[in-house]
Amino acid sequence: MKTQDNSLSQVVKKLRRAGKIAGLDKNRKKQIKTFLIEQVSGYSGIGVEGRQEVINFS
Amino acid sequence: MTNPMADQLKIKFINIYEKYADAIYRYCFFRVYSRQLAEELMQEAFMRVWKYLASGKIILNEQALLYQIARNLIIDLSRRNKVRQNIEHTMFSGQNSFDEPSYDGKNILETRTLLGEMYQLMNKLSPDSQDILIMRYIRGMSPKEIAEIFHTNPNNISVRIYKSLKKLSKYI
C-alpha cells in the first residue's frame, strides 16, 4: 500500500514540476494583451450598446 | 469604443485576461506541447470570451467558460490532426525536441527531458483524463471547480483523478 502511495505521489510531483516550468512568458503576456485590446477596441455589439442577456454557463 | 458601457466591458475583459491568461496558456501547452500553438489557442479563447461579453451575454463562471472554449479549440485542432502532427514534428525533427516554454534560467536539457516524459506519460490517458490531471495538478483546481467544467459531480472527478494517477504510476 505504501509503495503504491509513493508511486502516486511521484506522478503528482512530476506533474507539478512540469507545470512550474511551462509558464507564459511575462513579455508575451503583455504583447498578447496589447493585441487583444487593439482587437476589442472599436468592437460594437449588443452588450456594448447596453442590452444584456444572462447565460447560465457552468 | 467611447461609451461608458463599452469601457466597462473592456475593463472586465482585461481583468479576466489578467486572471486567467497564464492558466489557460498552461492548459493549452500541455495539450499541444508547443509554445506558439498554445499562445494562439489562448488568444483565440479570449477573443471568443470577448465576443460573448460584447454580444450582451453575462458570464456567470468565467473560468469554466474559458476552459470549455479552450477544450473545444483543442478538439477542433485534433480533428484536423494538427496537434499530433505538431507534436511529432517537434519531438522527432532531431533539431528541437520541443518548442520549449520559458524556463527562467532552468537547464534546457532538463526542461526538454521533463516535457518529453510528460508527453509520453500523458499520452497513456484519454484527452478528458489528461484535461482533469492538468487542471488538478498543474493549475491547482479543486475537484469541485473541475466538475463545473465537465458538468459532473466532484466525486466523479476525484475517482477519475485517482484512477489516472494509478494508471500513470505504472510507468514511473
Image (cartoon, coloured by chain):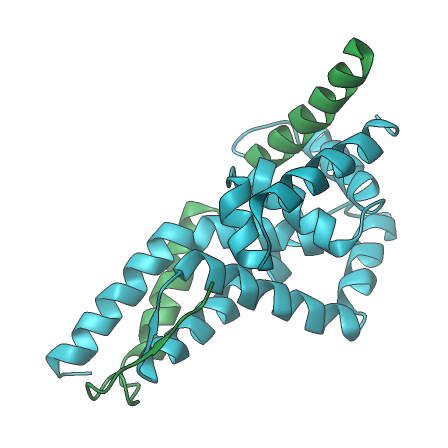
Residue B61 x, y percent position in the rendering: 40, 60
Seen at 64% across and 34% down, the residue is: A18
Look at the image and tell me whether residue B135 can be seen. yes
Farthest top residue in view = A2
Chain identifier matching the green colour in the rendered picture: A
Residue A10 x, y percent position in the rendering: 72, 21
Closest to the observer: A45 or B103?
A: A45
Seen at 39% across and 78% down, the residue is: B52
Residue B111 x, y percent position in the rendering: 68, 33
Seen at 81% across and 70% down, the residue is: B81
Seen at 77% across and 10% down, the residue is: A2
Quadrant of residue B9 in the image? bottom left
- Which image quarter is the C terminus of chain B in? top right
Quadrant of residue B39 in the image? bottom right
- Which image quarter is the N terminus of chain B in? bottom left
B170 sits left or right of B11 in the view: right
Does A4 sit above or below residue B171? above
A16 sits left or right of B64 in the view: right
B124 sits left or right of B112 in the view: right
Q: Colour of chain B?
A: cyan
B82 sits left or right of B3 in the view: right
Closest to the observer: B35 or B146?
A: B146
Does A45 sit above or below residue A12? below
Quadrant of residue A38 in the image? bottom left
Look at the image and tell me whether residue A23 can be seen. no
Residue B141 x, y percent position in the rendering: 51, 41
Does B136 sit above or below residue B129? above
Farthest left residue in view = B4
Tally of numbered tags: 0
